[in-house]
Image (cartoon, rainbow, N blue to C red):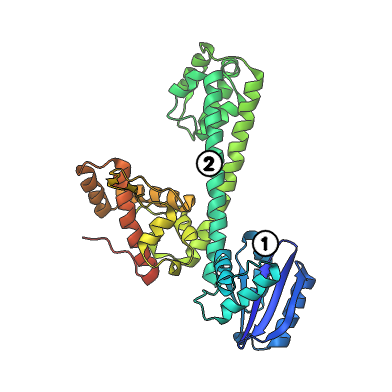
Amino acid sequence: MIYVGIDVAKDKHDCYICDSDGVELYPPFIISNNQEGFEKLMNCICNASEDFSKVKVGLEATGHYSYNILGYLLSKGLLISLINPLHTNLFRKSLSLRQTKTDKVDARTICMMLSSGMALTPYSDTSYHMEELKSLTRYRFDKVRERAQLKQSLSRLVTILFPELEKLVPTLHMKSVYTLLLEFPGAKHVAEAHMTHLKHLLSKSSKGRYDKDFAETVRNAARNSIGSDMPAKSLELKHTIALIHVLTDEIDEVEASIREIMDTIDAPILGIPGINYRMGAMILAELGDLSRFSSPDKILAYAGMSPSTYQSGQLTSSYAHMEKRGSRYLRYALFNATQYVCMWDPTYKAYLEKKRSEGKHYFVAISHAAKKLVRLIYHLQTTGEAYCPTA
């Protein structure tokens, strides 16, 4: 076997190549993070062995810096393992008492890890899909949160400019309301609007739900409104609505890409009532390779949903709070998914009611149901079985 260790950096990568006996085939060398550097590395690998089934490549998982060289080597058909930098660090320290740490040493250490027979999971098409999902779901998470902040700003501005409007509609965050405020950003503007135009605008944007009577109600409320006439706030309101529309279009596009990947993966957890492709994608993306977890409890700990323990002497706290460490994205996805599963799945609904009848707070009961759900997800994803509701 031929082993290739790569220490990844922003502008260059340190490489080391050896064989199964630890014989150095090439002295440690540096390649640039460009096409020329990648081709130089590939020439060295081909000179060492033309049979790529006998070549193993290892590189540290250093976030976005490793994406380009990883994609290049995968396109060449090489077997690649992404290694946690913490594992590399611990392995290097176990080899020597000297605290020597350089990029060349790290490249050699990765080679030694590959040749030591450690259980390193090769990077696969599934890993690629998981990376894509993680990027998309986290991007969507941030955009949804950004849109929520804009919606709060919109509510604040309406309270200043036209506070009576909120009592006339089920919610301010409707297409018809946005269309109205985009053209008439304030009570004064609505009060001066022509009735025919106002009626047509509301009717068209609400698909016929709002008629002339409603348009008259809105205009009368505007004429008697206590809302302030502030051009600066009106301009801010129009721009806020425009930004909400832009973010909504972006979120829809991201969700379409997420759905496309989830259709390719065909994950069993989507069969669980209450878990849609958005929450399912977020859970799978944050979990990644399930072989990393030896039990469902490890997943809860990774998500920071395990109860904390506090003990000192003879004192043991009876109030075990959630640790809230690890992946906040996974914790968010599991917690929200559990709430919906408890609404739609009779088994989980009964389990939640049982915990609530024991006197547990709603969120504590949800955390118990989340643990039950994680065990189910772990089983379905590791066995590939379809979900079968308990009769």
User: Between residues 262 and 205, which one lies in front from this camera angle?
Assistant: 262
Q: Earlier in the sequence, mark 1 or mark 2?
A: 1
Which mark, residue 145? 2
In the image, residue 64 above or below residue 15: above
Please identify the quarter of the rendering in which residue 2 is found: bottom right
46 vs 29: above or below: below
Instruction: Kindly identify which numbered label has been placed on residue 96.
Output: none
Pointer 1: residues within 10 angstroms few (<14), some, or many (20+)?
some
Which residue is identified by label 1?
65
Q: Is residue 277 left or right of residue 191?
A: left
Q: What secondary structure is marked by label 2?
A: helix
State the residue lying farthest toward the right.
36
**Front-lying residue, 192 or 374:** 374
Residue 332, image x, y percentages: 44, 48
**How far apart in space, not on screen, are marks 1 and 2 (Cα)?**
27 Å
Query: Who's the residue at 77% across and 77% down the image?
Result: 40
Amino acid at dot 1: Tyr
The picture places residue 37, in percent across and down from the top left corner, at 77, 72
Q: Name the residue: 33% across, 61% down.
A: 375
